Image (tube, helix red, strand yellow):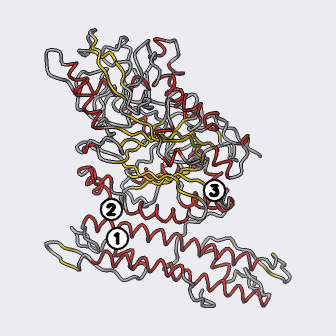
Amino acid sequence: MTCEIKEIDINQIVEIVTPFDKFEHEPLLDEIQGNIIKSHGRNHAVYLFLKFEGDIEAAKQWIGSFTHRYVTSALEQAEQGKLYRQNKDVPGKIFANFFLTRAGYMRLGYAYQNLPNEDAFRQGMKDPNMQNELGDDSNQWEDGFKNNEIHALVLLAADKIVGPRTQEAKLEEQKDQSKLRQQPALLKNKVAAIKKELDAIASVVHEQIGYVLRDQNTGEEIEHFGFRDGVSQPLFLKRDIEKEREHSDFSKWDSRAPLSLVLFKDPLGTKHESYGSFLVFRKLEQNVKAWNKDVVKNLADKLKGSGQPKPDLAGAYTMGRFQDGTPVVIDQASSGKVPQDNNFNYQDDPQGFKCPFHAHTRKVNPRGDTSVFVSIPLEEEKMHRIARRGINYGILPSEEPENNAGLLFMSFQASLANQFNFMQKAWAKERNFIKRDVGTDVVIGVEKKGDDNIAVTETYNWPTNWGAQEQTEADFTHWVTMKGGEFFFTPCMSFLKSLAPEPSRNIEFRGVPKQEIEAAKGVIAELQNYKQRNWAIGLNGDTIEPDKFLTFFNQRKLPFKFYLQNQVGLGESSAYDDNIKTLNKYIEDVINQESDACEYKIAELEEYNVLNWAIGLNGDTLQPDGFVNFFGERELPFKFFVQSQRVSLGDKSAYDQNIKTLNDYISSLNRKVPSTVGRF
């Protein structure tokens, strides 16, 4: 009996049930990259913009190997999230994405007609016609974007890895925002290692470091102008939708979205579930000092009337929300509640007396305004939405930077033309949307400076008193400058993995890893000996019972090739070399996995060193901690450092000594281990 495989309909997939429940779409999540339908959630990220050079086959091999080792699928991301919510140990892993431009695909040898079919993607963001459409000016871009053809983008993200105290470390970052700019040791070390690998195949033409800026009191994500960020995203996962339902009945605004909002069929994929997404990356510099001055001096003063200046309300008029996220259309003063109400629209404010039409959030998410003013159905309007995944960069807002700080804007969408480009062209930079002469989006409506390189100032009408008809005319300057960007496609997992078809495997060691390597090398030597003698492998020639080779392979769940030349007649003589190849790959996988585990532990030790936390014994219980167990399992010497009222052990040199021990151990794994014939 055969079962017909039906093409999935992503237009009908709403409220995905995430893993560990009854789950219909697990193959789809396993095929798409993480971060598309749910933000990766890490506090720190690094972006490497690549230009492939030299051997293209080597570049493809690297991409495939990088994918197998690091790129995180949506399924793996969901599984990690589940473990985290259950307070279980989550592997201290790097989160990674890999993206390609049109030029990148073609550099790798893929024909133009076989690329994702979207005109904007094929044009690229630097194309003069695209510059005109989006209102950009590449002359003001940074050199890495302006002077190079970008082929690919690697995103690497992580939190501080400090084992069971990771949450404590995150709270430390929240209280002291300067720590948010300090890269986690794991991320810093991994980026350095990956850049060294890239030396042979590509140039890193631009590198960007990002961090999630958080409110020191609430922990909510904010951006450099001080407003809560990440509010009102389209929701795809049932868990997120149920959380939204806790404080919203969706009567005025339904945040749910079908997967067709963000997924586009990958033409190079081979599965029914092979989908990717178009990525927009834009580096948006924010002049915080000038913005703060403009809000207070040029706007708040004009709104005071006979009373005092209203900087909070003035800022809310520009963004459409107060800094804590409260929509200005439903309140004239910040309510201070978290989470803020997202169940609202603008039907009760048709004249813009509460929320101006040029306010950022009303411009880019009009919530039904188009159906009222230009007869566009709400469901059609909602398909212009994007899934935003931005992160901050540069100087902290508390220092009121004028440059070198802002937002690394990222968004996923199924169509550049119908989503980001439409939003930017027809809404944000259009003076007559949603009504005539309301002006451009006061935040991002004009990113190109004037001929004299001075930020553009517009005159807007603002409600003098919230909800009242009286309007005040006041100038406001566009303090956001586009510094460079590009359009990318997010390939499906199977396409990326196919570039290096032999993946690393997750190994469960039998005993100490170093001894396991020695044992595998011993089996290789024994197989070579049997090959010279033309002896049977897999089954004993006399008893036809499983032999020691087959037992060794079966214990490790490794594929095995038989070779017997007697009355049974099984296999071919190539089985010797095939099995040796399998074991060499197994040794490589053991070394890679063990090296990764040690690198994570090294990063953890580096973080503990910075925080001056005890290692070896838990500070409260004085029981052996994870470091002692890790070193003990590998029969490695460990140095304690505990300074408490009850115990004083070692000194601060213990951190560096333990790190050296692990580095030496990694080196020893990669050196030739003496073979011992017959170690079974």
Residue type, label 1 = Gly
Q: Position of residue 497 (x, y in %)?
A: 63, 56
Residue 281 image position (x, y, % from top left):
50, 41
Above or below, comparing residue 147 to residue 535 in the picture:
above
Structural distance between the alpha carbons of marks 1 and 2: 9 Å
Going 31% across and 55% down the picture, which residue do you hit?
167
Q: Which mark is residue 497?
A: 3
Q: Which mark is residue 626?
A: 1
Q: Earlier in the sequence, mark 1 or mark 2?
A: 2
In the picture provided, is 658 more to the left or to the right than 94?
Answer: left
Separation of disc 3 and disc 1 at Cα? 33 Å
**Residue 197 image point, x, y percent:** 55, 65
**Marks 3 and 1 in Cβ contact (< 8 Å):** no
Query: Residue 164 — which label?
Result: 2
Q: How many residues crowd mark 2 within 10 Å: few (<14), some (14–19), many (20+)?
A: some
Q: Is residue 554 visible?
A: yes
For marks 3 and 1 on the same chain, the one whose residue lies earlier in the sequence: 3
> What kind of element bears circle 1?
helix
N-term mark: 2 or 3: 2
Query: Mark 3: which amino acid?
Result: Lys
